[in-house]
Image (cartoon, coloured by chain):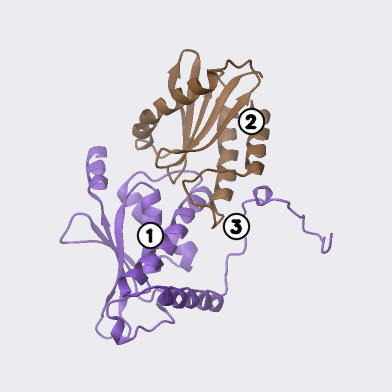
Chain colours: A brown, B purple
Amino acid sequence: MATTACFIIVSRNDIPIYEAEVGVAAKREDAAQLHQFILHAALDVVQDLAWTTSAMYLKSVDRFNELVVSVYVTAGHTRFMLLHDSRNDDGIKSFFQDVHELYIKTLLNPLYLPGSRVTSSHFDTKVRALARKYF
Amino acid sequence: MIGVGKMKQYSNVLDKPLTKGKQEVSLSAFAFLFSELVQYNQTQVDNIGELERRLEDAGYAVGARVLELLCHREKGNRRETRLLGILSFVHSTVWKVLFGKVADSLEKGTEHEDEYMISEKELLVNKFISIPKDMGTFNCGAFVAGIVRGVLDSAGFPAVVTAHFVPMEGQQRPRTTILIKFAEEVLRREARLG
């Protein structure tokens, strides 16, 4: 299914540690910045919402025109945020869970400083493969 | 490739499954490793406070990872949002996975609202260590205090965590207490959440 989507991992200190544009729809030049702006603006909402529930998947927390922001918060308060324009709750939840496993494996590396950028190209490849699988 | 046996060879750690693996680790191996860690840090610092801080920092890194891993494995992806929840998580789940048993006791401090104590009769890391008199109040449990601080900090409950010896009558070795003092914002948020 062709959809625009922007996926960002934001650490506990509100620093993005991974970004990826996934999706096959036509992209405008300024779309990337707009996507990032929307996701960062949604961080405040996520902050409040995260303390009201003990679930990790927070479904959709914010809207912008037709774009919807879905968020998944891990135990260490690392946020996986996805900006997309279709409704596919189950697919998105499974996508988040698989990326969560990848993130834990990255975190377990004793040489990886939690909160720093994830630069592994293998991680990037796997995330994009998961995105293609679920969207 | 040499040694390609029945086990599948993974080219990258991200492909390996996140299984429980072997539950047991050799105690002697750990004791040797920990003693080497302490000795190495001893050569790098000038005073006790610095040594304790280094052990704590080592434990902090462990704590941050343990929190994510255990919430994923044991708790089926449910986070802790309340103070008592995270304390009992540390006291039972974390202790069970790291030391093989739940902690001996979890108490609330009587003098201050924001203090909690986890006590252990014989902390695993202190089992084979004796502190010389001239090191005063130094406690290798600072490593475990660091682990607890890592777990609490990553979960959003910043706290100051320290390890103390509490002498008990009738027992040769003193009991070890991990003292947790939560930051202001944690108590305010707890009050707000009701």
Q: Nearer the viewer, residue B159 or B6?
A: B159
User: Depth check: A130 or B93 in front?
Assistant: A130
Element at label 2? helix
Q: Is residue B33 above or below residue B113?
A: below
Q: Which mark is residue B20?
A: 3
Question: Are the residues under badges 3 and 2 in a single subunit?
Answer: no
Disc 1, SS:
helix
Please tell me in which quadrant of the rendered image residue B21 appears: bottom right
Side (left or right) of B100 relative to B56: right
On the question of residue B151 being in view, the answer is yes
At label 3, counting other C-alpha atoms closer than 10 Å, the crowd grade (few under 14, some 14-19, many 20 or more) is few
The chain holding disc 1 is B
Classify residue B12 as left or right of residue B149: right
Marks 1 and 3, how far apart at CA:
21 Å
Mark 2 belongs to which amino acid? Ala
Disc on res. B148: 1
> Considering only vertical position in the picture, is A49 above or below B46?
above
State the residue in front, B134 or B168.
B134
The residue type indicated by label 3 comes to: Lys
Image quarter hosting the N terminus of chain A? top right
Residue under mark 3: which chain is it in? Answer: B
Direction from residue A135 to residue A81 in the image, left or right: left
Q: Have a look at marks 2 and 1 and say if they share a chain.
A: no
Give the residue number, with chain letter if any, for mark 2: A131
Residue furthest top in the image: A65
Residue A97 on image: x %, y %? 56, 38
Q: Is residue B11 above or below residue A132?
A: below
